[in-house]
Amino acid sequence: MSVPPTTTIVPALRALAGREIVRVLRQPARVVAGVGTVALIWLVFASGLAGAFASGETGYGSFLVPAMASMVAMFASVFGAISLIEDRQHGFLQGVLVSPAPTWAVMLSKLLGGVVMALAQGVLILALSPLTGVSPPAAGWLLGVLALAMMSAGVTGLGLALAWRTQSVGGFHGVMNLVLLPMWLLGGTLFPLDSAARWLSLLMHVNPLTWTTDALRQAMLGEGSLGPWAWVGSVAFCLFGLLAPSCMARFGRVRPDA
């Protein structure tokens, strides 16, 4: 007998997404390490290159605001993806996958939990931006949080999709270094699109993290290179992040106990 979706999907989403958030809150060292590392990198780069770079009327420390927010989102996505691998290794994922809740709901709950934590940590970085002279209007703050949410969804979804086919935490770190780290470096984070070499600029334009970073920079700093296309690309990256984990679990299926 089929079970009404409202009695399985909604409770499953609420319980599993809440579990992801609680797991992070019970390990505050992860949050402190993630935000603290980003703040340290921010301080070093902003101080070391302050005299060598300026973007419009803002200094390099202000220019790095979207870069640091995207780095926090990337760290959070890594932790969320690692939790998927750990759940598989410890047998929890197998038990959830044989429950009445569909596979897509399980993956969506993982995604929602990761996005909430990535967004919360990213907002902490944005809250520090006035220290660098960034003072957007209220609409700018709202658009900045929206851009950060789309960025978090895209990066977290990509991390979960990659983790589904990765059998160990060590293997996922290798995948992260091969995929996620280059995405961040070529995401318009450390230098603007206009100053890059032509071949590098082409790579940056097709990098989805460039779109969300540019949208966040437009919201917080009022400047960017892609105009409204940054927001179009951000929506597309967000949708990709929402769909990729479930599609990978369905069509790129591997044994959950592998």
Image: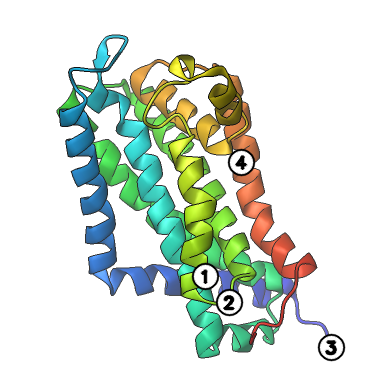
Mark whose residue sits in front, 1 or 4: 1
Query: Which comes sooner in the sequence, label 1 or label 3?
Result: 3
The disc placed on residue 143 is none
Q: Is residue 29 above or below residue 63?
A: below
Query: Which comes sooner in the sequence, label 4 or label 2?
Result: 2
Q: Measure the C-alpha gap from mark 1 to mark 4.
A: 25 Å
Secondary structure at badge 3 equals loop
Q: Amino acid at mark 1?
A: Gly
Query: Which comes sooner in the sequence, label 3 or label 2?
Result: 3
The disc placed on residue 167 is 2
Quarter of the image containing the N terminus?
bottom right
Q: Residues within 10 Å of mark 1 (few under 14, many from 20)?
A: few
Where residue 179 sits: x, y (%)? 54, 51
Q: What residue did someone put label 4 on?
A: 237
The disc placed on residue 1 is 3
Query: Which comes sooner in the sequence, label 1 or label 4?
Result: 1
- Seen in the image, is 100 located left or right of residue 151? right
Secondary structure at badge 2 equals loop
Q: Is residue 15 above or below residue 221?
A: below
Mark whose residue sits in front, 3 or 4: 4
Q: Is residue 69 above or below residue 177?
A: above
Q: Amino acid at mark 3?
A: Met
Contact check, label 1 and label 2, Cβ < 8 Å: yes
Q: Amino acid at mark 4?
A: Phe
Secondary structure at badge 1 equals helix
Where residue 231 sits: x, y (%)? 57, 27
Q: Residues within 10 Å of mark 2 (few under 14, many from 20)?
A: some
Q: What residue did someone put label 1 on?
A: 171
